[in-house]
Amino acid sequence: MKYIIRKRKKEDCISIANIVTIAWNETYKGIVPDWFLEELKNNEDDRIKKAYDEFDMNNNNQLVLEVDNKVVGFVNYGKSEDNEFNNCGEIFALYIISKYKGNGFGRKLVSAAIKELKSLGFDKMIIACLKGNPSNEFYKHIGGVYIKDGIYKRLNLPENIYYYENI
């Protein structure tokens, strides 16, 4: 499989919204309420329009994974919003369609995001992952140290927070 990781472009908004819908429905069935997964399907067009209208190349902390010329995953990163961590970066989202998992793409996206976080001046980062998500094992495997519980505010669900020092 031929792949590239690159900065998001405006025309990627459709693919990214679709990946969110697919990845959440593949990964979070039984973890998040069914109504939320259904809502993702029903509001995909609205999310596409909003992302397209608000796209700003100068404020673009998102990388996409393109495999065989098709966008199949992405990662969002930036300054952590967790007040406990000064000068800390964060990976806010990492999604890959299941068909493409198991090929090392998750690790490649994390590495690319770390490179971007370093360029923004960060030397440590955190990643939050909903409890019950199989990706918790991945985040530990790539060196994350569980440091605390958090709450995914949008759905008031528990999550694990992983810390990475000297990224």
Image: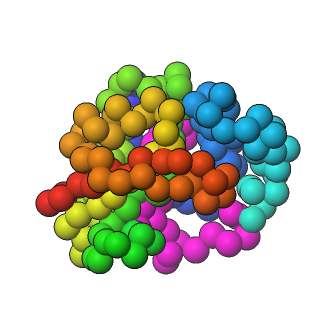
Task: Pick the residue in front: 67 or 158.
Answer: 158
Answer left or right for 13 relative to 81. Answer: right
Q: Residue 7's spot in the image, x, y percent?
A: 45, 58
Quadrant showing the N terminus: top left
Whether residue 71 appears in magenta in the rendering, the answer is yes
Q: Residue 110's spot in the image, x, y percent?
A: 33, 47
Residue 69 visible in this rendered orientation of the protein: no
Residue 137 visible in this rendered orientation of the protein: yes
Name the colour scheme: rainbow
Q: Residue 48's spot in the image, x, y percent?
A: 74, 56
Task: Pick the residue in front: 42 or 88.
Answer: 88
Task: Pick the residue in front: 60 or 69.
Answer: 60
**Total numbered badges shown on the rendered structure:** 0
* Quarter of the figure with residue 2: top left
Bounds of the magenta span? 51-78
Which residue appears at 53% of the width and 26% of the height? 98
Which residue appears at 33% of the width and 40% of the height? 139
Answer left or right for 95 relative to 44. Answer: left
* Quarter of the figure with residue 140: top left
Whether residue 66 appears in magenta in the rendering, the answer is yes
Q: Residue 115's spot in the image, x, y percent?
A: 26, 59
* Quarter of the figure with residue 23: top right
Answer left or right for 142 relative to 113. Answer: left
Quadrant showing the C terminus: bottom left
Above or below 157: residue 67: above
Task: Pick the residue in front: 32 or 24.
Answer: 32
* Farthest left residue in view: 166
Which residue appears at 68% of the width and 63% of the height? 51
Which residue appears at 34% of the width and 34% of the height? 138
